[in-house]
Amino acid sequence: MFKTSKPTQLREGQVDTMIGPQVVIHGDLHFSGGLYIEGRIVGKLVAQEGQPASLTLAENGSIEGEVRAPVVVLNGTLNGDVYSSERVELAAKARVQGNVHYRVVEMTAGSMLTGRLIHAEAAAALPAPEGAITALAAMD
């Protein structure tokens, strides 16, 4: 009788879950909706496939591990690779050590990236690494 529909988009800045500054999580975290991190995560952060999701890392927050989410906004410290299907934003206090795979990227003056920016469509067009070709040739 009553029909509930889930929104397909998140409102800008929507926060459904917050990890406070005193919280430390060891382990992988799977989420959907808006996730705001002020604490420390040691492990992977993975957005649920097919669900709207955004991750925001606050200035004093930190992540040690891979991040996979449609929208990623970083203003803290991240040691790991980022995979974003929509947009990555590196704010002024962002310190990223790892590769950033993106469709759209925004970098504010002051942000630091030690790694590579890899466009999603460009990555598919890249040739295989030399080591992979050598390994295949060695198998023959």
Image: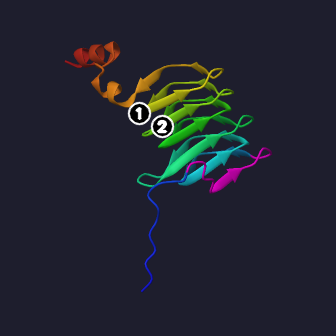
Percent of width and height locating residue 94: 65, 28
Around disc 1, counting alpha carbons within 10 Å, would you say few (fewer than 14), some (14 to 19), or many (20 or more)? some
Kind of residue at disc 1 = Arg
Check the picture and name the quadrant holding the N terminus: bottom left
Magenta residues (range): 12-23
Residue sitting farthest toward the bottom = 1
Residue 101 sits in which quadrant? top left
Magenta span contains residue 7: no
Around disc 2, counting alpha carbons within 10 Å, would you say few (fewer than 14), some (14 to 19), or many (20 or more)? some
- Which residue is disc 2 drawn over? 87
Badge 2 marks a residue whose secondary structure is strand
How was the colour assigned to the protein in this rendering?
A: rainbow
For image coordinates 23% across by 15% down, the residue present is 137
* Disc 2 + disc 1, Cβ < 8 Å: yes
The answer to whether 75 appears left or right of 9 in the picture is right
As drawn, the label of residue 15 is: none
As drawn, the label of residue 103 is: 1
Q: Main secondary structure of the magenta part?
A: loop
Residue sitting farthest toward the right = 22
Residue 108 sits in which quadrant? top right
Badge 1 marks a residue whose secondary structure is loop
The answer to whether 61 appears left or right of 132 in the picture is right
Kind of residue at disc 2 = Arg
Magenta span contains residue 14: yes
> Which badge, 2 or 1, comes first in the chain's sequence?
2
Q: Nearer the viewer, residue 96 or 11?
A: 11
Percent of width and height locating residue 53: 51, 50
Percent of width and height locating residue 82: 51, 33
- How many numbered circles are shown? 2
Q: Nearer the viewer, residue 9 or 68?
A: 9
Check the picture and name the quadrant holding the C terminus: top left
Position of 67 relative to 1 (above/below): above
